[in-house]
Amino acid sequence: MILKKEGLTRAIEAVVAAGGSEPREARLVAENLVMANLLGHDSHGVGMIPRYIDSLLEGGLSVNQHPKVQIDTGALLALDGCQGYGQVIGQEAMAMAIERAKKHGSCVMTVGRSHHLGRIGQWGEQAVAEGLISIHFVNVISRAIVAPYGGADARFGTNPVCIAIPLPGEPPFLLDMATSAVAQGKIRVAHNKREKVSRDWLIDDRGNPTDDPRFGVVDPLGALRTFGGHKGYGLALACELLGGALSGGGTEHQAGDRSKKRVWNGMLAILIDPARIENNGLFGQETVEFLASLRKSPVAPGVDKLRIAGDPERETRAKRERDGISVDDNTWKEILAAGAKLKLAAEKIEALARG
Ligand SMILES: NC(=O)c1ccc[n+]([C@@H]2O[C@H](COP(=O)([O-])OP(=O)(O)OC[C@H]3O[C@@H](n4cnc5c(N)ncnc54)[C@H](O)[C@@H]3O)[C@@H](O)[C@H]2O)c1
C-alpha cells in the first residue's frame, strides 16, 4: 500500500486513541512514527504499533504519563519516564532540558523507564530547532540481541547514539545511529528471502561470525555484532552505563520476562547552547569553513555525492512526502490486528488511512 502521510497519521492516531490515550498523546505517537517512515527509518515507523499495543495490553506501557522530576538542580535534571509513551516522555523531557540549557548555557538531563523513545534523532532535532547542540546516549531494555565484542551471546540491545549540531545557513548535522552493525529487521528480511548476510553483522550460537541469517531469527539464536568491532562495542557499553545505569532506568540485565513485548529506553542527553560557549562567533565561522573544505573532497568512484549525517534522511523525506509511504502487506495486517485487539474496526482504520 502507498499511503500519504496525513491519512497514515490519522489511522495510527485512531489506533493509539483506542488504547485510552488522550488526543494529544495519540497525535504525538502517530506523528513520530510516520515521520520515521518519511525519513526512511521504517524499522522505527508505524510497524512499531503492534508491539506498542501488545506492550500496553501486557502492562509494559502506561497511557497518559508525563515525566516525573526526581532531581532538579537547574542545569541538572533527572526524570522518570513512568513507562509512558516515549513520544510524549521524550518531547516533554527535551522541552524541560531545552529551557534549562537556554537559561544556564547547558543542561544534563537523564530520563529512565520511558517506553520506546523511537527515532532518537527527533530529540536531537527538537534541541537544534532552538539553536542548541544535543548529545544522546540511549539504552534499550527488551530482549538482548547484540553481543559484546569478543563475547558469544547477546547481552544488550541496539543502543543508539545521537549527536545533533545546528549549522549556520543549512540544515543540521544529525548523526543518529544504532550501535549494532545493522538493524535486526534486515536479518529477518534476508532470512525470508533466503539470502546470505555479511559476516560483519552476525555471530552464530557459538560466537563464530556467520553469513546465515537464521542465527538472527530462529533457535539456536546467535547475536548481532556491534558496528566497527571494539569501537561500536565501546559506544554501546557507554549507552548502557549512561542511558541505563546513570538514568536510574536500569540496564539490560534487568529485562526480566523476555517474552514480553515492552521496549523501555533510558537516555542521557547533554544540551549545550553554542551561543554561550563560542569564542566571538568562531564556532559558526569554523563550521562553515570546515564544511566548505570537506565538500571539496573529490567524490569516490561509484558514489553520487558527498553527504553529511542527516542528508540521506532529508532526501528520503522529500521523495516520500511527494510519492507517499509504502507500507508492506504484513505490517498493515498487523496494524489492523492491533486495532482489533482494542475493538477498533479494520474498515475504520482503512478509511482513515486512505483519507
Ligand atoms: N529507540 C531505540 O531503542 C532505538 C534503538 C536503535 C536504533 N534506533 C533508531 O533507529 C534509527 C536507525 O538507525 P541506523 O543505525 O539504522 O541508521 P543508519 O545506519 O541508516 O544511519 C546512521 C547515520 O548515518 C548517517 N548516514 C547514512 N548514510 C550516510 C552517508 N552516505 N553519508 C553521511 N552520513 C550518512 C545518517 O544520516 C544517520 O545519521 C535511528 O533513528 C535510531 O535512533 C532507536
Image: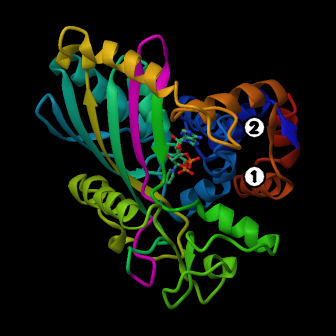
**Stretch in magenta:** 151-172
Residue 315, numbered label: none
Q: Position of residue 112 (x, y in %)?
A: 31, 51
| Residue type at numbered disc 1 | Ile
Q: Quadrant of residue 14?
A: top right
Q: Position of residue 139 (x, y in %)?
A: 38, 57
Residue at x-position 74% and y-position 51%: 339
Q: Quadrant of residue 162?
A: top left
Q: Residues within 10 Å of mark 2 (few under 14, many from 20)?
A: many
Colouring chosen for the image of the structure: rainbow
| Mark 2, secondary structure of its residue | helix
Q: Disc 1, disc 2: CB below 8 Å?
A: yes
Q: Position of residue 344 (x, y in %)?
A: 76, 47
Identify the mark nearer the N-term, 1 or 2.
2
Q: Which residue does the numbered mark 1 point to in the structure image? A: 335
Residue 195 vs 64, above or below: the answer is: below
Residue at x-position 64% and y-position 70%: 198
Q: Which residue does the numbered mark 2 point to in the structure image? A: 11
